[in-house]
Amino acid sequence: MLVPGYRRSAALAPATQLPGSEEALRLAWVDVAKGLCIVLVVMMHSTLGTGNEMGGEGFLHTVVAFAKPFRIPDFFLLSGLFVGRVIDRDWRLFADRRVVHFAYFYLLWVLIQSAVKYGQIVDGAGPGAFLAHLAHALVEPYSTLWFIYLLAVFSVLTKLLRGLHPALLLGGAALLQSIPLEGYSDLVTEFCSRYVWFVAGYLFADRIFRFAGLVQRHPLAALGGLAAWAVVNGVFAFTATRHETFPTLASLPVVSLALGGAGALAIVATGALLTLAGGPVTAALRACGERSIVIYLAFFLPMAATRTLIVKTGAITDIGLASLVVTIVAVLVPLAIERVVRHTPFVFLFRRPAAFHIVAETPPRSARTAAAR
């Protein structure tokens, strides 16, 4: 809903209709870019955890540090790309698609993760401590699941604020990102740090899709741009500041905003170029992107198990190699589990059952066509 007498500028108008048909709405480069993001997220958790357990750093720590300025910004930017498709729908449908959906997986996997860590959580205090932990997870996102929690929060807030001038919405989100929030809760900190990227994906969806198309039409120029970006990002990511709150140049206010935006576009460009090139790496990344939520929900189990096995057996002594093995296992095992349970009663782990929909799920067009024959 727009403010009376106000016309959105073309530069900041959110896209409620993206290019072409339903198939075009899920362009291959989006899944490839999401695949890159989820691999980088898993790599970060796997590498830092393995380094801590083995008491040092390996070559993947360098990759993790390089990706820090853009790893999460791009994930939220891509998540905001398609919110314009449903933001003007009635609240019941919107809530089903953007709130209940994420709430279901968050609550389910909070319970699963907490059950696995029951001993650590309770620590001899009994079931009451476990129930208190679950209650706390309702107001403070638990463990790695904070991303799922915030997607629901961001979606609702963006719908509520969609009548604001886009420049005000984006400017307010950017201001929040630049405010130091040391000592606040994780929910407040992550909300303020990340909302700008979700808003940017929502407002600039059309332009981002056009940018990806431009990259695919001019691949050599895009490669040159990516090379220049990589140098600049690396300089800022690896230059220390001797400041406790902002340890690198990349973490400084405003600078982090600029680098996050540039890095997000770099991932978009990389996804577009890989899609243009094709090949097994692109296919693998696209498969990861199509099931990024599967990987995100379940990677912690194989990650922790593999890391513990490597550390206790001493099978791999090189920290970099150990981190790489943990990352690969943590990405592949959730995909394998999802494939195994896809046609079993355990499909509820990765697919929301009909009982947890408040609006009936629309079957794919192919299914509707087949049913009509």
Image: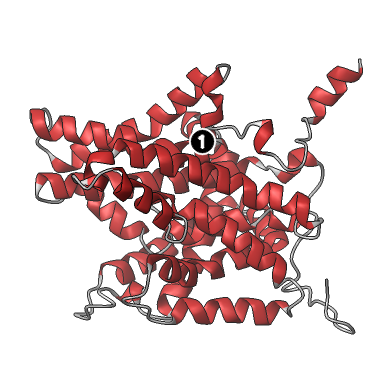
Q: Secondary structure at mark 1?
A: helix
Binning the other alpha carbons within 10 Å of mark 1 as few (below 14), some (14 to 19) or many (20 upward) gives many
What residue type is disc 1 on?
Answer: Thr
Q: Position of residue 3 (x, y in %)?
A: 83, 80
The residue positioned 65% from the left and 77% from the top of the image is 169
Q: Nearer the viewer, residue 121 or 38?
A: 121
Q: Quadrant of the C terminus?
A: top right
The residue positioned 55% from the left and 65% from the top of the image is 197
Q: Position of residue 255 (x, y in %)?
A: 41, 78
Colour scheme in use: secondary structure
Does 113 sit above or below residue 148?
above
Q: Quadrant of residue 317?
A: top left
The residue positioned 36% from the left and 61% from the top of the image is 68
Q: Position of residue 361 (x, y in %)?
A: 75, 35
Does residue 167 appear left or right of residue 70 in this picture? right
Q: Nearer the viewer, residue 118 or 41?
A: 118
Q: Quadrant of the N terminus?
A: bottom right
Does residue 216 appear left or right of residue 113 in this picture? right
Q: Quadrant of residue 290?
A: top right
- The residue sitting at the bottom extreme is 5
Q: Position of residue 362 (x, y in %)?
A: 79, 35
Does 94 sit above or below residue 277?
below
Does residue 252 appear left or right of residue 160 in this picture? left
> How many numbered tags mark residues here?
1
Does 35 sit above or below residue 238?
above
Does 197 sit above or below residue 181?
above
- Residue placed under numbered mark 1 in the picture: 282
Confirm whether residue 218 shows in the render: yes
Confirm whether residue 272 shows in the render: no
